[in-house]
Image (spheres, coloured by chain):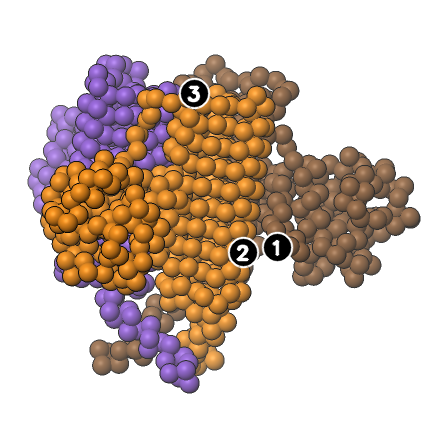
Chain colours: A brown, B orange, C purple
Amino acid sequence: MNLFDIAQKLGIPIDSEHIEASKAMDVKGLNTLQDAISSEISFLENNKYLSQLENTRAGAVFVTTHYKEHLPSSCIPLVCDTPYLQLAYCSKFFALPLIQKDGQEAKVSNSATIMSNVNIGLDSSIGENTTIMSSTFIGDNVTIGDNCIIYPNVTIYRDTIIGDNVTIHAGTVIGSDGFGFATNSNGEHIKIYQNGNVKIGSNVEIGANCTIDRAAFASTIIEDMVRIDNLVHIAHNCKIGYGSVLVTQVGLSGSTTLGEYVVMAGQSATTGHLSIAPHTTISGRGVVSKSITEPKKQWAGFPLMEHRSWLRMQGKIQKLCFPKDS
Amino acid sequence: MNLFDIAQKLGIPIDSEHIEASKAMDVKGLNTLQDAISSEISFLENNKYLSQLENTRAGAVFVTTHYKEHLPSSCIPLVCDTPYLQLAYCSKFFALPLIQKDGQEAKVSNSATIMSNVNIGLDSSIGENTTIMSSTFIGDNVTIGDNCIIYPNVTIYRDTIIGDNVTIHAGTVIGSDGFGFATNSNGEHIKIYQNGNVKIGSNVEIGANCTIDRAAFASTIIEDMVRIDNLVHIAHNCKIGYGSVLVTQVGLSGSTTLGEYVVMAGQSATTGHLSIAPHTTISGRGVVSKSITEPKKQWAGFPLMEHRSWLRMQGKIQKLCFPKDS
Amino acid sequence: MNLFDIAQKLGIPIDSEHIEASKAMDVKGLNTLQDAISSEISFLENNKYLSQLENTRAGAVFVTTHYKEHLPSSCIPLVCDTPYLQLAYCSKFFALPLIQKDGQEAKVSNSATIMSNVNIGLDSSIGENTTIMSSTFIGDNVTIGDNCIIYPNVTIYRDTIIGDNVTIHAGTVIGSDGFGFATNSNGEHIKIYQNGNVKIGSNVEIGANCTIDRAAFASTIIEDMVRIDNLVHIAHNCKIGYGSVLVTQVGLSGSTTLGEYVVMAGQSATTGHLSIAPHTTISGRGVVSKSITEPKKQWAGFPLMEHRSWLRMQGKIQKLCFPKDS
């Protein structure tokens, strides 16, 4: 679909100077300002990303008239009042087929074990010595490497890529839609179609009944050697660094980036769009609401503070409240 | 089953003046004081519902001797020491069959897609263009509307009603038993059979590995346009208002009513038997323990307070505890 | 496998005085210092368990040279720098087969109902009047008693033992691997194979999408009459006492022992390796980080304190922070 047609469908006028270029631009999808390439459309909703706008390689950007002048000259402006909402409407044009009708039958290695009642989609492949247990669903265009164990009742959505020596326990869902919506003037939540995927490295173990959402654009990434306990939620576009450990009931909001060897203890959480430095430990129930840049520290509480400060603070609160007990 | 027989089975004597009426009352089920009709039995356990007792349309009520005089004249008293416990014993008489033996084969529209290893129960129906993916279970007497997507490994218990354009992600459970028990004098927890159902409106999206429990009586209700993230728990008899948003790992206790456009951020919770005014926002980790009557405010913390007060309080606690840092 | 061969594989030298005994010791598995018997190997990593070392009946123990002298004379020392890490490497030798190749076909009682797409493993048995619903997976060597209801899409891993009158709601996972790892000098997390099982008593009800992990050694135990809500996590080697109640989204860390009739309210948690006295109530969101020895009290908060103290403290904090409002 070319950009001109997309803009017409959305009712967004294109400046006469860009009409020819917009007809020539074959749009492949949507992406962030930082990651978009010349065949992709991006958007600017929040002016804290203005410097990314100025440097984007996107072919076109949904932008309010106010920021139009900040676009690089190679980038076609799609001027509108509600860039994020237009992105939502536009995402539907690139929605992936729920179930592929065409494609090659799955390639299952001879040494793989496929138990009963397993569905494996088109264009998918299952590596050497991998076991897929009963009632597990493998969608279309999924790649699973060698020596993996996928326990029963797991659901792996389309386009997921999984390395070697990966274990996924029962009931876990990989690649479900990220929770992305734009709100229109009536307060309605318009779905942003989640057209990315999930990539899981090698030597990863994921517990039971976890959920790892596919990316809105590009990939949600679980790097090698990660360990994930049960009932953990990883939202769209998260990146979990090498060797990190997520303990039970952790909840990571969208676009959380963990460096290598980060430990998130039980029931801890992040508020999204932030990064955590390598070798950081978040204590149980800690809530990370802004980026942590200094590595190798331990943090706790909500609001978050250094673990030792949190311990001191709890002692002081007790003394302030119950002075006679002290 | 008539009321006289039920009372006999439970060992509850009926006053001579009510014996004839009790034999004539064909009991259809149990319900709350507020919602019960003349063919239903209700109960009074907590005297804060005394005004509801005085106005109930229930045909009979489990009640202690103390409150017997408060019943409307049309209502037969079932006088006992432990009304809630008797309700629990009585609920078993109305338990639904786990699997129906009789009924009509499911009506599946020609345009629906049913993947492999799907069970669809008796008396159920699947609408136009709806897709049911592999290993999903649809129980008896379930209605699913048009243009729905039910992802793999979903379980939809009997009697669930789902509107049009509803998406339910993998692993989610709709209609499991609410967590209802009455405790007897030995400390044993006696099950209250959950004889209600779940009703989901149209244009709803529900994430992966959520749990939405069926009602004890009547219905757990998810209204139109609701958006639910992954790993969210909705207990029995909740009502989620139009356009509300529940973010990951939210936990709603029984009989929580959300007005329209309520937002519950990640890991927030309610303690049950309360209502939240329209357009309320509960911040991440907030715990709602009593009703919120004023609309359009944002709340946070546990105990809950206005979000801006919570922010100020956290700043003040830091200053009180670490005065030198200030 | 005899102890001598195991030590050789791990590169651990055995003192000449113990070589003969190590060749004679047919090792059956691994266990804690407290529970190990003469055919089992144990380990000492933390000197708080030193008295257990001195009294262990284990046939051999991974131990640093410093504590070697504390072993009972009947116990063979496996001297190494990193006992817990050696335990992890050793656990792989006793890993259970993922899927049995040999064994007897499952014994399913004539009165049991097995719905469609159910897998039942070898050496398993299903009792009288038990119903196994669609797409549920029952692994090898599983015993399920009489009058049980196992709802759809449940996964029951190998070796699980379930009593009579047990109900397990949809999507729940029983017997997944505990989250056990030892970290080597490169920071890599080496899996401790979870060679124990889960034992569930009688008259137990477990909600939807819960996870109950198998034990590292011996058993994770759910005693009779326990009630578990949805999305609850129970880690390896927990023991849940008779009549206890776990409300939604509770997370119990490894080796938590609950006495009888303990109530853990919604979203509460434990940090593991601790015990809670009978008839204790933990309020919603409470975090138990050390053992509770006095029965029949109610606790709240994090850090945990008596519920009434927590209430008073919250009031005092408000007064300290907002003196004018008081």
Q: Nearer the viewer, residue A50 or A17?
A: A17
What residue is pinned by disc 2? B261
Q: Chain of mark 2?
A: B
Q: Is residue A22 left or right of residue B154?
A: right
Above or below, C105 relative to B139 = above
Distance between the alpha carbons at the discs numbered 2 and 3: 38 Å
Q: Amino acid at mark 3?
A: Glu
Indicate the secondary structure of the residue bearing disc 2.
loop
Distance between the alpha carbons at the discs numbered 3 and 1: 41 Å
| Rendered location of residue B123, percent (x, y) | 42, 26
Q: Is residue B212 left or right of residue B177?
A: right
Disc 2 and disc 1 in contact, CB within 8 angstroms: yes
| Rendered location of residue A37, percent (x, y) | 74, 43
**Which of labels 3 and 1 is toward the front?**
3
| Rendered location of residue C243, percent (x, y) | 17, 46
Q: Kindly identify the residue that appears in the image at 80 percent across and 48 percent down.
A: A12
Q: Does the rendering let one see residue C65?
A: no
Q: Chain of mark 1?
A: A
Q: Amino acid at mark 1?
A: Gly
Q: Kindly identify the residue that appears in the image at 38 percent across and 77 percent down.
A: C318
Indicate the secondary structure of the residue bearing disc 1.
loop
What residue is pinned by disc 1? A187
Q: Chain of mark 3?
A: B
| Dots 2 and 3 on the same chain | yes
* Residue B105, numbered label: 3
Q: Nearer the viewer, residue C289 or C7?
A: C289
Distance between the alpha carbons at the discs numbered 2 and 1: 8 Å
Q: Residue furthest bottom?
A: C324
